[in-house]
Amino acid sequence: MRRRGGARLASLVAILVGIVWLIPFLGIVMSALRPSRDVLYGWWRPPFRFTGQNIVGAWHHPTASIAAGLRNSAQLAVFATLLPTLAASLMAYGLARLRFPGRGGILMTIGLLLAIPQQMVAWPVFQILNRVGLLNTLTGLVLVHSAWALPWMVFFLRGFIETLPIELEEAAVIDGAGRFRTFFWIVFPLMFPALASAMVLQFTWVWNDFFMALILVYDPRRMVVTQQIPLLRGQYHVDWGLLSAGSLLAMLPPLLVFLFLQRYFVRGLVGGAIK
Amino acid sequence: MAEVLLKEVTKKFGNFVAVNKVSLEVKDGEFVVLVGPSGCGKTTTLRMIAGLEEVTEGEIYIGGRLVNDVPPKDRDIAMVFQNYALYPHMDVYNNMAFGLKLRKVPKKEIDRRVREVAEMLGIADKLRAKPRELSGGQRQRVALGRAIVRNPKVFLFDEPLSNLDAKLRVRMRAELQELHQRLKTTSIYVTHDQVEAMTLGHRIAVMKDGQVLQYESPRVIYDQPANMFVAGFIGSPPMNFVPARLLEENGRVWLQGRGFKLWVPPDKVTPEVRRYLGQEVVFGIRPEDIRTLDTVRELVEGRTFQGRVKVREALGDELIVYADVAGDEIVAKLDPRLPISPGQEVTFVALLEHMHLFDKDTERAIL
């Protein structure tokens, strides 16, 4: 009896927290889809009339086109997700399975790097990119995000690889596979649940990043969507509808990526390998 | 096909010696079983032959070629793992074809061989199934099939049946035997199960603490164990070991224990046995070489002893009796129809033509 009461209380708290989380999101949806003058005194006030005008306006905005921002963000996020995922999975495999001098030191260094705040490296990163001529380019931003992702991804993926039964790799080696074949044909496919998780996290992180983009990219044509949104504010007047529509559009891609990849999260691919 | 030769092979993990100067010769087409308790070094030995573990000292030859520095893929061996190690993301067909693909065997040939082996193992209808859709026995067959399609010089088995339930294990054991008769590929098989060792092996290497204690045919291992460990490890229930003293009285050699005095048959009194006259030895006799007096029709003079029954275990086809003989425990395997109950005093007969004697310090066989 007591346990059921506790469970009910926990559910109640969870629901309340959920509502608190959802309200701002609901507000953005409402103000994005309703005419500006209807929401002037609060998005929760009737009458409820809906329009696509704000969306279209934000999409085609003359100075801060969300369409262009989305395109830039997509390019950035896709490359800044795939590149570190691939590199980190190779590094993680090496650190999980190979024994070589300095391995412990490398692991420790990676662990320490995880503790560094991004703001601390902003200035050196700016200088480096400037020197190699990648300042104000998406390529530069891709590299910065990739480098930033490597430590946590290596840690995360290495942990996962260590849970895979080593006999699979031994079987592959006896079957005639070398290190790279063993990795790409046996280990990599089995890492998919971990890779999916890492990719969702990285994609979302890169997509939502404002700080690095703000520092490293200033050409309006190359700006990512998070940079475009504040530009939707007019100089003398804030069009909340337009701003909300831009935010809503910017929010969608990570959500879609998550929905697409989340089914791989829990699905263990290793079933049937052993025992 | 090929013979495998181990010359004083040693494996150290840091300071721990896992395998200590093991020398083994496996003939072409022979089925050899490495058996011993866990941690005896049998799996490490197998993994060194496979190339999964480096050899610290000594030499390994496969088919006359020194393979110490040859990578596993170039040793032309196939291994069946204890937990099968099937590639979970590949179906049965690709699990079996993987090794052939890597060896650039033509597609048609791969297809022919995979289907032939699948047919042979009775998994032809499962070729498109993923490992997780298969039962334990089927997975085991796929693991075998993956080894067989490669047509390697040597099969290595690492406790392949230990994950199966008892019934399936018996069946797969028979199938393995049949398979070997058909393929005649040199095989090295690791197990801790003495029944598997006895039934499968042409020769058995009994290992303990990284060393091979005896390497002989199952018959010899059973009838003439080289020491007390081998004698106790093979056979179920294990051989009885009782302290006794060798005496000579009236021209006869006797074995005097706490609760018995047995007459050692004259043909057993070898010069080696004679050297132990007057000394403490360990008398060994297998449970099946003990009878009760009323079931023996031959002369029993000097072969009987008294015991009080402590426990009886009727297993249907046999009766295991634990008896107290003046403080020593003796196990006898008897006819299940015998009316014996705990607490009863029984006169036992020892079939001394099957007796063993061991040095009590070195544990080596004297007889």
Image (cartoon, helix red, strand yellow):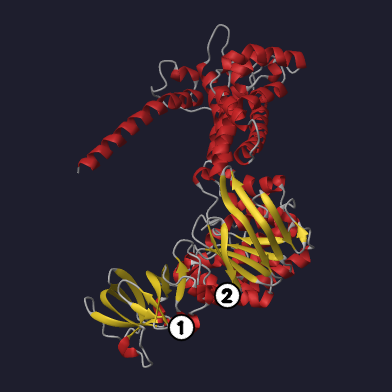
Give the answer, above or below, for where A255 lies relative to B51.
Answer: above
Where residue B165 sits in the image (x, y, percent)? Answer: 45, 67
In the image, which disc is placed on residue B353?
1
Badge nearest the viewer, 1 or 2: 1
Q: Is residue B241 left or right of residue A168?
A: left
Q: Give a yes or no on whether discs 1 and 2 share a subunit.
A: yes
Q: Which chain does tag 2 point to?
A: B
Q: In the structure shown, which secondary structural element does the residue marked by tag 1 occupy?
A: helix
Q: Is residue B293 left or right of residue B167?
A: left
* Amino acid at circle 2: Glu
Quadrant in which the N terminus of chain B is drawn: bottom right
* Amino acid at circle 1: Glu
Q: Of B362 and A224, which appears nearest the observer?
A: B362
Q: Earlier in the sequence, mark 1 or mark 2?
A: 2
Residue lying furthest left in this view?
A1
- How many residues crowd mark 1 within 10 Å: few (<14), some (14–19), many (20+)? few
Q: Of A73 and B8, which appears nearest the observer?
A: B8
Regarding residue A229, the answer to whether it shows in the image is yes
Q: Which chain does tag 1 point to?
A: B
Q: CA distance from mark 1 to mark 2?
A: 36 Å
Residue A249, picture quadrant:
top right
Give the answer, above or below, for where A30 lies relative to B97.
Answer: above
Give the answer, above or below, for where B248 lies relative to B100.
Answer: below
Q: Read off the residue under disc 2.
A: B175
Regarding residue A230, the answer to whether it shows in the image is no
Q: Is residue B169 left or right of residue B263?
A: right
Where residue A135 sits in the image (x, y, percent)? Answer: 72, 16
Give the answer, above or below, for where A89 lies relative to B208.
Answer: above
Q: In the structure shown, which secondary structural element does the residue marked by tag 2 occupy?
A: helix
